[in-house]
Amino acid sequence: MATFSPDYTLRLQRLLEVCRNLTPNLDFEPLLKSLIEIASELTSSESSSILGYDEEAHFLRVLAAPFYLMEKLGNVAIPLDRSVAGMAFTTGKPIILHHSDKDERILRIVDQDIPEKSTSVLAVPMIFKGKAIGVMECRNKFNDAHYTDEDVDILETLTAQAAVAIQYRHLLEEAQRSYEKALELDRMKSDFLAITSHELRTPLGLVIGHISLLKETATPEQLEHLKIIQNSANRLAEITAELADETSMKRGFMNLRRRRVGVQLLIQQVIDTLQELAVERNIAISSEAPRKEISVEGDSEKISVALSNLVKNALIFTNEGGKVKVKWEEVPGYVKISILDNGIGIPKEELPKIFQRFYQVEKHLTRKHGGMGLGLAIAKEMVELHGGRISVESVEGKGSRFMVFLPLNADQQKAAERVFIT
Ligand code: ADP
């Protein structure tokens, strides 16, 4: 049966207490610092340190040590083949040295650089998911005593904590790097879209202008062809406008030109401009106004863009013979505008994604409908610029209901910035 030293139980109790209190919320450096202090205390050592493996350089580097050692060793690359820590790291096993000042395995360059010489060393590899990621080391056990298996057990428990902290830090750094890369790619994409949409606008304007001129003198047969060209050119103009909206939104270039606008008039104008599409798709579009006229303080152009995108989607994603309805009512501080359709609906798992830029439920290459997957993202942004909110309920095969909440006035909008209505 194993025999333990008289104070081992006390040390284990202290270890337990310390591990319990080592909060995972501690920042990286303070956590490592606490671990080396505890390691020195529990193994009766003059000092302790934590070394991490640098995968690119294939060296160990000191991550935590008492300040006087850190100053000397902070930038030293500790080779794996000429150091005790390196040996513990490569063998994956704890190493105990006594009278280590005479031991060949002590890295002299390290020893030369520090005031106290090593008389004894305990090095324990830090293992995470079966892989060594660093080493924890204690030096100079007091009273020239030998490090024991009990010290190894204690240090192994502490290295497990250090390993988790180091891995956690690596993951955070990796996530940060990926995030920065994604931001950079997103910025490049926005720049590309901004330049492209800007460059396309002028020639497209000329094409549309010349079609109008040609229509004046065209024969009936030519007129048919010109209409097709005009529709396509208009569609292209819509796409470039969407792209321009998307990029200026992204760059924070959107300003609100606020005026008091009647909701009924606004909705009627939206329906009027989409009437042709409704007739073409044989869909009955109707509106239901409340008894009392409601007005909002907002940018009518931007609200119109948002509502047009929603009504247009309702018309596009509803089968022929279907119905689309727009109704609105006042709710405390807001006007709630609902756009209802009895169309194809949206699968439940897609609902959280449809407001993302360039997202389309049907894959782009196989889908029947045009569009860039920007309509809802733009609608959302325009509504949120007003301090409003947009939401959706939908049942596949039955239809959808998009709801827009717009603050009635600018004061309400400020209040909405603090607390959002549900
Ligand atoms: P797009 O202009 O390409 O349609 P949107 O951002 O407007 O892009 O819409 C994103 C996706 O959400 C659409 O591709 C469609 O799949 C789905 N969607 C939007 N509105 C409706 C609706 N009323 N009914 C069913 N699906 C809809």
Image (cartoon, helix red, strand yellow):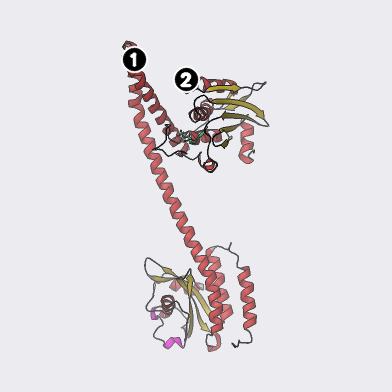
Per the image, label 1 sits on a secondary structure element best described as helix
Per the image, label 2 sits on a secondary structure element best described as helix
Q: Relative to residue 37, is residue 259 depicted above or below?
A: above
N-terminal-most mark, 2 or 1: 1
Q: Position of residue 45 (x, y in %)?
A: 54, 81
Q: Amino acid at mark 2?
A: Glu
Whether residue 397 is visible, yes or no, is yes
Specify start and end residues of the magenta stretch as a single range.
92-109
Question: For this rendering, which residue is in front, 222 or 107?
Answer: 222
Whether residue 214 is visible, yes or no, is no
* Quadrant of the frame with the C terminus: top right
Identify which residue is drawn at 63% across, 84% down. 7
Q: Say which residue label 1 marks.
A: 223
Q: Is residue 304 magenta?
A: no
- Badge 2 crowding class, 10 Å Cα cut-off, few under 14, some 14 to 19, many 20 or more, is few
Q: Looking at the image, how many numbered discs can be counted on the residues? A: 2
Q: Relative to residue 281, is residue 102 depicted above or below?
A: below
Q: Amino acid at mark 1?
A: Leu
Q: Position of residue 68 (x, y in %)?
A: 49, 74
Which quadrant of the view contains residue 132?
Answer: bottom left
- Badge 1 crowding class, 10 Å Cα cut-off, few under 14, some 14 to 19, many 20 or more, is some
